[in-house]
Amino acid sequence: MTAVLEAVDATKSYGEVLGLNGFTATVGPGTTGLIGPNGAGKSTLFRLLVGQLHLDRGRLELLGHPAGAQGEFRRRVGYCPEHFALYDWMTGLEFVTGLLRVDGFGRAEARGRAGAAIETVGLADAAHRRIRVYSRGMRQRVKLAQAIAHDPELLLLDEPLNGVDPVGRAHLIDLFERLARDGRHLLVSSHVLYEVERLTESIVMISNGRALAQGDFHRIRDLLDARPHTIDLATPDPRGLARVLSGWDHVVAVEFPADGRLTVRSRAPETFYRDLPGVVVAEGIRVTAMRSVDDNLDAVFRYLTEGRG
Amino acid sequence: MNGTLGRIPVVARLAFRASLTGLRGVALVVLALAPTGIVAAIALADPGDAATTATAEGLFLSLTLRVIDVLVLLVVFASAFRSEIELDTLTYLTTRSIDRAGVAVGKYAGALAAALAILAPAALLPLGVAALGGGTAPPIADPVAIAAITVLAAAAYGAIYLLLGLLSPSALVLGLLFGFLWEELVLLLPGSFPRVTVLYYLLSVGARLTASGPLHAFPTVVSLPAAVAGLVGVAVAFVAAAAIVVRSVETAPQRITA
């Protein structure tokens, strides 16, 4: 299968500000998370992919076509932009129907597809209300509805969970999973890492316009081997446990973040996890809870950006 | 599936509704009705004055065509692209499978219909009000000329402003400079200079279609077919330019952040 997205040295500047700076990445089929803080270049990448901006340098392809290709190719792609601007003077149903008609669907089919898409995103009750009275969450949903209504094989979703309430988020994440199961490819951007972590393990990390790391989350996690691993322990005797652990070669730091808590940084987490139960038994120190602080994308991203920034 | 040609009317309908929606649409209608209000006030102040009709025609030339048309057409056509670019809603159209040139043509057609919905009554109502108020009934050629000038003005100025709105974030300022400075000042220059203004051809149409009165008074060397062809040519050239430019221009708003 052709790569869903292929970027080689993609560069785009706004005057002296670099939006993308030699971005190089390959995104395969399925769902991929594009992760980075605000200003990292995520939206610039999306704008380039849909032809709203043009590259200064490099190559950017979508489904084997040059980014920004126009005409019938666009029917294969659905785009949900980050911003919340819509045609406020229309109803949600009119908005989606109108865009489908621009896409070439006949009146009846457009209306049927629009109604189905609006129901899919959970906006059926508000379909006939003017968009100007929609909340941010409802706007997000109607943006998604127009992106999926023409049944594209690739969805470009720029911060699609922004502004959506927790129940709505769960609903939309279910929807994204369903779309992926149905064989669609999704490129989902977010600066909230746990959202993407719930959707996929395939990620591209972007910062300062560059792809910082890409691939399976666990492979990226392997990049951290050289970095001290952080473990949070709950124990009634943190100082006693710290005395023992600080004698281990691979433990580089111990901290006491709160009463009954101990944070340990180890360069050999596997050894740590292997040896800790022995200490607990031998020293008679109870450990009531243990949590690897690094076991989420947030920690990975922080490490990569801080380490290379 | 409809081809691009079949989708242009859809874009035109969207542009038409967008042009007439909201406070902006109301403001434009109120502005356009100002000449009618002035003529009505004159007719009420001096009922039965036969000169009211000539006053209405003079008002068309001095106020409607040279001020109100310019403002309404500038707002409607320049914002057809510029408002959407700055709001970032144009992306909903340009990311569909329609050829972008079709978007430009559709927007032009929708804006033209919206502008004429505002300007045609504005141009013709004063004549009707003047006749009802006791003014002499104008020869049929006069309202025909006024209607023709209004349609051609909308077509030609509209195409220019459409392209301006697509190209420049300062389209409104540039449009005002063009409409009020270039058009009026160059028209005053001697020799052939006035012929590089749109207004010259519009006034020529009025002069050629009427036999007397304010509309006929404009001195022109251009025939009616040449004037109409010139105006239609301007409209076609600028719409074609917009259709070409929109396929390659960046359409992200200026304020975008990465």
Image (cartoon, coloured by chain):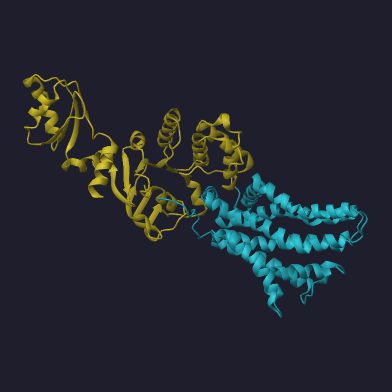
Chain colours: A yellow, B cyan
Judging depth in this view, the residue of B140 and B182 nearest the camera is B182
Q: Residue at x 82, y 53 (%)?
A: B125
x, y (%) of residue A236? 16, 20
Q: In this picture, is A42 found above or below B77?
A: above
Left or right, B10 with respect to A142, comes to: right
x, y (%) of residue B32? 74, 53
x, y (%) of residue A239? 12, 26
Judging depth in this view, the residue of A67 and B258 nearest the camera is B258
Q: Residue furthest front?
A: B45
Q: Quadrant of residue B182?
A: bottom right
Left or right, B202 with respect to A100, comes to: right
Q: Quadrant of residue B74?
A: bottom right
Q: Residue furthest bottom?
A: B191
x, y (%) of residue B184? 69, 69
Q: Residue at x 46, y 54 (%)?
A: A68
Q: Is residue B209 visible?
A: no
Number of on-image labels? 0
Q: Is residue A48 visible?
A: yes
Q: In this picture, is A197 found above or below B181?
A: above
Q: Residue at x 56, y 62 (%)?
A: B244
Q: Quadrant of residue B154?
A: bottom right
